[in-house]
Amino acid sequence: MTESTLNRPASRSSGRWVLLVMAAVCVLPLMAALYFHFVAPPAVTTMVGQPLAPFVFPYAGVQQPDGQPLAAPGVGGQWLVVVTGPGSCAQACRDALYLTRQARTAQGRNMERIQRLWLLTDATRPADELLAVHPDLQVLRVTDEAVAQKLGGGADAAAAPIHLVDRRGYVVFRYEATVEPAAFIRELRKLVKF
């Protein structure tokens, strides 16, 4: 017997092992995908905000305290987190302002991508101590009642919703005042990365 004849069964055996490993590498991902699709599907996370048919934020119906109009940002501006309500700011309003402050702070290095707005729907001047705890809050005045109605902050709205305006100036999400804070922060973190 020659040496090549003696090594033939060993090389045939190692060739089979290589073929089995290659088949396993191809089949195992498919088996795992089927398992996770049919047997143990991952939990589906839902959005906590209500997606809106995007509409342009009504810059013309809002002005700064000195009477100057609010300029619309160019493409690539900041995300706006908007609370709309009267200057007296009941507890629900204070809670919404606190939530937006915490949500912005929780973004860490991305917090500069977010600007917080409080749209006042009446002539009441907000309390100085309230403004002192929200130094990054931009306070604006609504000059058109239709804006307040559209953003849910009319005179009878004690707990106005929070609206999210994207970087192009479109209102895209609405959050109820009772939104769960951790979920709101998580969702905002995902959105502002874009």
Image (tube, rainbow, N blue to C red):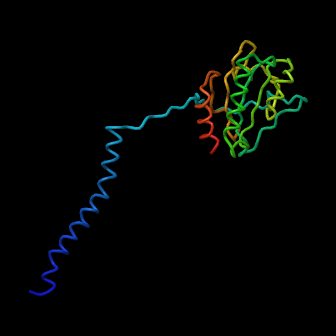
Q: Is residue 18 positioned above or below 92 on the image?
A: below
Judge by depth and name the residue closer to the eye, 15 or 156.
Answer: 15
Tell me which residue sits at (79%, 30%) in the image: 134
> Residue 28: where, in percent of width, then height?
31, 53
Name the quadrant of the C terminus: top right
- In the rendered structure, the answer to whether residue 51 lies left or right of residue 72 reads left
Of all residues, the one furthest to the top in this rendering is 156
Tell me which residue sits at (62%, 26%) in the image: 175
Of all residues, the one furthest to the left in this rendering is 1
> Residue 186: where, in percent of width, then height?
59, 36
Judge by depth and name the residue closer to the eye, 153 or 91.
Answer: 91
Judge by depth and name the residue closer to the eye, 52 or 17.
Answer: 17
> Residue 73: where, in percent of width, then height?
76, 41
Name the quadrant of the N terminus: bottom left
Of all residues, the one furthest to the right in this rendering is 66
Task: Give the image quarter of residue 5.
Answer: bottom left
Task: Give the image quarter of residue 171.
Answer: top right
Task: Give the image quarter of residue 98.
Answer: top right
Of all residues, the one furthest to the bottom in this rendering is 2
- In the rendered structure, the answer to whether residue 163 lies left or right of residue 187 reads right
- In the rendered structure, the answer to whether residue 45 lies left or right of residue 84 reads left
How many labels were placed on the picture?
0
Q: Is residue 7 positioned above or below 22 on the image?
A: below
> Residue 93: where, in percent of width, then height?
73, 20
Tell me which residue sits at (38%, 37%) in the image: 41
Q: Is residue 123 positioned above or below 69 on the image?
A: above
